[in-house]
Each structure stands twice: as C-alpha cells, then as structure tokens.
Amino acid sequence: MVSKGVLVGVVAAVVVVAAVAGFFLSQTPTQPSGGKVYRIVSMKGSYVPPADWKFGDPPVFSDKYYNPSRLTINVGDTVEYVNEDETPHTFTSLKVPAGASRFDSGAVEPGKTFRYTFRVAGDYTVYCTLHPHKGVAITVK
C-alpha cells in the first residue's frame, strides 16, 4: 500500500509536468493546414518618412515602406513579416475587424522575421510603432 504522502507527491508532480507541457505546447507556432504563407518586407531606408508626413497623420500605404503595402489573403493564411531595413521595426495591428485579436510583433531586428496567422475575415491596418508613417492594408476573405 502506498502512503498518503507519497501519493500526494506523485499527484503534485503529475500536475506540474502537465502544466509545464501545456505551457510549452501553447507557445509552439503552428502552420495552419492548407493555409498559404505570404511575405511582407520592410524595405531598406523605410524608416525615413515622406517629407510632408507628420506625427498624427495616418500611415502611408506604399511599397517603399512595406512591400507589398496592400495584400488580399484568405482566413487561415499566414503573413511572414521580414525586416530587410537597417533598423528595428514592428508589425503591429492598428485596425482589426470585429472579433479579431490585435497583434504586435515587438521590435523585429534587421534580418529577423515575425509570423501571424489571420483567423478572422475583414480589413486590417498594420503599421510600425517605431516609424508610424509605414502602413499595410490587409484584406482577409
């Protein structure tokens, strides 16, 4: 017969292992089945705003900043943001449709990437919090 103390210890260990495994499994990125991956790139020098742009203005949709600056995808598709500029940038939702979650890549260093899978149809506006003149319009069907 197993003592009550040993049984409590075994149960506690199982609970801890399950909690840790659940945490790590929830952190693992998954590729949607059947979804496509689209690349959006921060172009070199895209940190420089247009001469007539001022803080408070809406983001500019131009392939000079994010390429492409307009994209249409399907629910379940993933966008891979690639920073090819020489300074950090973010890939952050400014506007999302009802029912969608906001997202923020945090600072993406030069040469690094960030992926986001779109699960809700609608129109999204994405910008860089560090260089808010840069914008992307994404339509999810």
Image (spheres, helix red, strand yellow):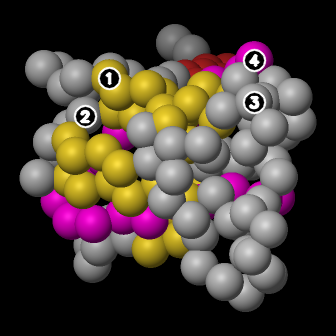
Foreground mark, 2 or 3, reads: 3
Compute the Cα span from label 2 to label 1.
Answer: 6 Å
Residue topped by disc 2: 77
Q: From the viewer's perspective, is residue 74 above or below residue 43?
A: below
Q: Are marks 4 and 1 in contact (CB under 8 Å)?
A: no
Q: Which amino acid type is shown beneath numbered disc 4?
A: Gly
Residue 44 is marked as 3
Q: At which x and y percent is residue 5? A: 70, 29
Residue topped by disc 4: 111
Residue 106 is marked as none
> Which residue is found at the position 52% from the left and 12% from the top?
1
Q: What stretch is highlighted in magenta?
A: 111-131
Residue topped by disc 1: 37
Kindly state the secondary structure of the residue where label 1 is placed. strand
User: Which residue occupies the extreme bottom position in the image?
Assistant: 56
Q: At which x and y percent is residue 118? A: 31, 46
Q: Which amino acid type is shown beneath numbered disc 2?
A: Asp
Q: Which of the 4 quarters of the picture holds residue 58?
A: bottom right
Compute the Cα span from label 4 to label 2.
Answer: 22 Å
Pointer 2 or 1: first along the chain: 1
Pointer 4 or 1: first along the chain: 1
Residue nearest the observer in this picture, 139 or 18: 139
